[in-house]
Amino acid sequence: MLRWSVIFFVIAIIAAIFGFGGIAEGAADIAKILFFIFLALFVIAILFGASIFRR
């Protein structure tokens, strides 16, 4: 999921360089959403992983 976030971020940068503001904004929004989903899943995985090792 982090890979997709980086891909959309790169698409947003390239679109912004070429002047496609709407496409750049959309790709940046998608990248942000995917990054926060990844971050939430990562924290949940760490919490559950830590609880498994405490048993």
Image: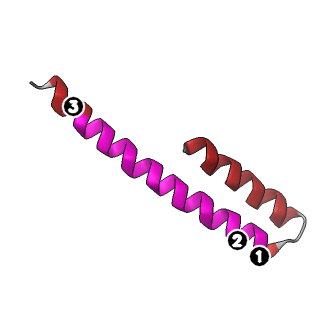
> In the image, is residue 34 above or below residue 54?
below
Q: Which residue is mark 2?
A: 25
Query: Which residue range is magenta in the image?
Result: 22-48
Q: Secondary structure at mark 3?
A: helix
Q: Residue at x 83, y 63 (%)?
A: 15
**In the rendered structure, which disc, 3 or 2, sits on the residue that comes first in sequence?**
2
Q: Residue 47: x percent and y percent?
A: 24, 39
Main secondary structure found in the magenta portion = helix
Residue type at mark 3?
Ala
> Alpha-carbon neighbours of circle 1 within 10 Å: few (<14), some, or many (≥20)?
few
Q: Residue at x 30, y 44 (%)?
A: 44
Q: Is residue 27 left or right of residue 31?
A: right
* Depth check, front residue: 52 or 17: 52
Q: Residue at x 52, y 53 (%)?
A: 35
Residue 41 numbered tag: none
Colouring used for the render: secondary structure
Q: Residue furthest bottom?
A: 22
Q: CA distance from mark 3 to mark 2?
A: 37 Å
Q: Residue at x 12, y 26 (%)?
A: 54
Q: Secondary structure at mark 1?
A: helix
Q: Residue furthest right?
A: 18
Q: Residue 53: x percent and y percent?
A: 17, 23
**In the rendered structure, which disc, 3 or 1, sits on the residue that comes first in sequence?**
1
Residue type at mark 2?
Glu
Please tell me whether residue 38 belongs to the stretch shown in magenta: yes
Residue type at mark 1?
Gly
Q: Which residue is mark 3?
A: 50
> In the image, is residue 55 above or below residue 32?
above
Q: Quadrant of the N terminus?
A: top right
Q: Residue 28: x percent and y percent?
A: 66, 64
Q: CA distance from mark 3 to mark 1?
A: 42 Å
Q: Which residue is mark 1?
A: 22
